Image (cartoon, rainbow, N blue to C red):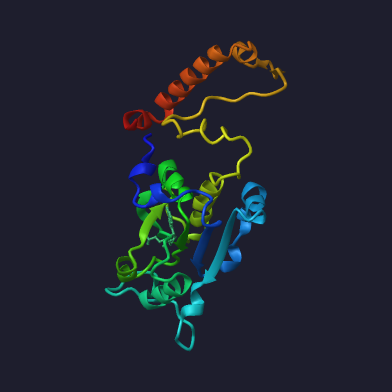
Amino acid sequence: MSDSLADAPGAATVTPGLGGRWRATILTLYPEMFPGPLGQSLSGKAMAEGKWSLDAVNIRDSATTKHRNVDDTPAGGGPGMVMRADVVARALDAAAPADDPRPRLLMSPRGKPLDQARVRELAAGPGALILCGRFEGVDERVIEARQLEEVSIGDYVLSGGELGAMVLLDAIVRLLPGVMGGAESGTEESFEGGLLEYPHYTRPREWEGRSIPDVLLSGDHAAIAKWRRQQSLRITAERRPDLLDKG
Ligand code: SAH
């Protein structure tokens, strides 16, 4: 996988860690879902340390009708409801002024499938504004008018964008400077070299009649590196040959 940081618009000029913490603003009908799992473990600790921040804004606060409607029936008929362009735009505009440098993302199964290269670009930037859809999705006009980048987390349909936003943020936050323990643990992983990761083992040395491969206990670092590379290639060829074609 190529390191596409260099050709991402603006991304190469942003120095991670400068200009303050990485800032996420989530627009959602369910702000109480956040931070949820992002408040725990690695991302929760990083948040407590001020390495990133998360604001969850309720889209309903931007509704103007008496009943605070955020959705309406689809033009042309059909099932479900559609989130109104005017309400969503008001929420977006209130959350970030026009000159806010952060990318405006819309979680959407129609979006470009998220990959580690895009995660890295986003982590290198100042933050993100993330709109979570519900119902059948969002009126197309607000996607165009506010130039929202549609991001998919995979070829399946969720009931809302919130879990997708959490997946995206979890992947980003672990790459922020100082968040992950070992500086190298981010570079050896699946996808980082365009390959899936090699197998891991730890104590006990023998377990249910299975032993750790001898080479890993040999102390021969060159042999270990070679074995791991071979295993990565084998696993990638078996499970994800498309990644080898990409590289
Ligand atoms: N009718 C839409 C699906 C709506 S699902 C369609 O067929 O394309 C409701 C919301 O869940 C979406 O607006 C989006 O925000 C979120 N969502 C669903 N699947 C998703 C996925 N794979 N990736 C990211 N967001 C998703």
Q: Can you see residue 54?
A: yes
Taking the image as shown, residue 136 lies to the left or right of residue 50, namely: left
> In the image shown, does 178 or 157 lie closer to the viewer?
178
Can you name the residue that lies furthest to the left here? Answer: 76
Taking the image as shown, residue 182 lies to the left or right of residue 118, namely: right
Residue at 68%, 15% (x, y): give it. 209
Can you name the residue that lies furthest to the right here? Answer: 204
> In the image shown, does 197 or 163 lie closer to the viewer?
197
Count numbered badges in the picture.
0
Taking the image as shown, residue 110 lies to the left or right of residue 60, namely: left
Residue at 50%, 56% (x, y): give it. 165
Work out which quarter of the rendered image holds the N terminus and state it: top left
Taking the image as shown, residue 112 lies to the left or right of residue 64, namely: left
Work out which quarter of the rendered image holds the C terminus and state it: top left
Height in image: 61 above or below 186? below
Q: Can you see residue 155?
A: no
Q: Position of residue 211 (x, y in %)?
A: 66, 15
Q: Position of residue 177 (x, y in %)?
A: 56, 45
Q: Position of residue 217 (x, y in %)?
A: 65, 13
Residue at 60%, 53% (x, y): give it. 51
Image quadrant, ligand 1: bottom left
> In the image shown, does 183 or 118 lie closer to the viewer?
183
Height in image: 112 above or below 213? below
Q: Position of residue 3 (x, y in %)?
A: 39, 37
Quadrant assignment, res 206: top right
